[in-house]
Image (cartoon, rainbow, N blue to C red):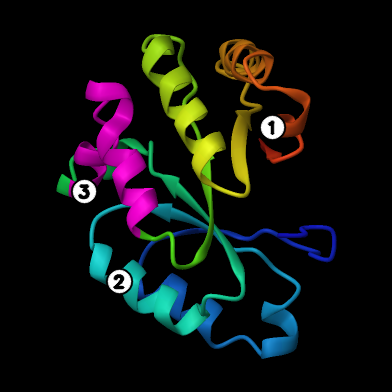
C-alpha cells in the first residue's frame, strides 16, 4: 500500500451523514484522500460505508476517545484495555478485507503495557498502521512520550509501516 499519492486525510466521526458525504465524492477525489473514520457506536453504519468505499482504497480507522462517545456500547468495548485491547484488535481484524490502516490513539501511559502489546500485534498484522500525536498543550508531552516508546519497540522495517498523524 503506497500512501505517497494521497493529498488529504479528512477526519470524520462515524455517522450516517458524515460517511454519506464522503461516499458522494467523485471517484477522482476519492482517489486522492484517505478518510480517517473515528469509530463510535453503530458498526453497521461503518460496514455499509466500507462496502461502498471498496476494497481498493485505503481508510484509517480510529477508536473514539471523545467524552461524548465513551458511553456508547461499541466505544466502551473498543476502549477496554483488558487482554491488551483485544476487542479493538479483533474489531480491526474483522475489517481486514478492506485496506484499513488501524490508528493507535492512546494519549496516556496509564495502560502502557496494553498499548505496547496492541501496537506490536497491529504492526505484525497489517500492512500499515498510524499513530496519532495529540498536539494540545495539556496532552502533548504524554502523547509524545508514548509515541517515542511505541516507535522504539519497532524495527526499522516496521517503522516504515507507520504513519504519524499530528492532531492539532
Q: Position of residue 86 (x, y in %)?
A: 28, 33
Seen in the picture, residue 10 relative to 86 is either above or below; the reply is below
Q: Is residue 152 visible?
A: yes
Q: Is residue 81 above or below residue 126?
A: above
Q: Position of residue 103 (x, y in %)?
A: 52, 42
Residue 89 lies in the magenta stretch = yes
**Which mark identifies residue 74?**
3
Q: Is residue 9 left or right of residue 80?
A: right
Q: What SS does tag 1 mark?
A: helix
Classify mark 3: helix, strand or loop: helix
- Residue 68 in view, yes or no: no
Q: Nearer the viewer, residue 119 or 19?
A: 119
Mark-to-mark CA distance, 1 and 2: 32 Å
Label pair 3/1, CB-CB below 8 angstroms: no
Residue under the point 70% across and 68% down: 33
Q: Which mark is residue 132?
A: none
Q: Position of residue 32 (x, y in %)?
A: 76, 73
Left or right of 123 on screen, residue 116: left
CA–CA distance in space, label 3 to label 1: 29 Å
Secondary structure state at the residue bearing disc 2:
helix
Quarter of the figure that contains the N terminus: bottom right
Frontmost residue, 158 versus 143: 158
Asked if the stretch drawn in magenta spans residue 154, the answer is no
Foreground residue among 126 and 109: 126
User: Magenta residues, as a range?
Assistant: 74-94
The quadrant the C terminus occupies is top right
Eye-nearest disc, 3 or 1: 1
**Residue 147: percent from the left, percent from the top?**
63, 20
Mark seen at residue 158: 1
| Magenta-colored segment: predominant secondary structure | helix
> In the image, which disc is placed on residue 45?
2
Amino acid at each position: 500500500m503506497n500512501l505517497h499519492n494521497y493529498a488529504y486525510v479528512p477526519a470524520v466521526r462515524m455517522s450516517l451523514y458524515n460517511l454519506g458525504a464522503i461516499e458522494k465524492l467523485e471517484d477522482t477525489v476519492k482517489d486522492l484522500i484517505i478518510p480517517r473514520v473515528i469509530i463510535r457506536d453503530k458498526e453497521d453504519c461503518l460496514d455499509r460505508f466500507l462496502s461502498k468505499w471498496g476494497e481498493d482504497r485505503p481508510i484509517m480507522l480510529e477508536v473514539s476517545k471523545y467524552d461524548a462517545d465513551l458511553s456508547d456500547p461499541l466505544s466502551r468495548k473498543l476502549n477496554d484495555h483488558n487482554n491488551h485491547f483485544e476487542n479493538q484488535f479483533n474489531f480491526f481484524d474483522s475489517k481486514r478485507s478492506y485496506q484499513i490502516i488501524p490508528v493507535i490513539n492512546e494519549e496516556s501511559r496509564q495502560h502502557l503495557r496494553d498499548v505496547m502489546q496492541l501496537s506490536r500485534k497491529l504492526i505484525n498484522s497489517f500492512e500499515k498502521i498510524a499513530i496519532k500525536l495529540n498536539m494540545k498543550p495539556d496532552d502533548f508531552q504524554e502523547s509524545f512520550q508514548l509515541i517515542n516508546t511505541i516507535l522504539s519497540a519497532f524495527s526499522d522495517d516496521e517503522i516504515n509501516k507507520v504513519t504519524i498523524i499530528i492532531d492539532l
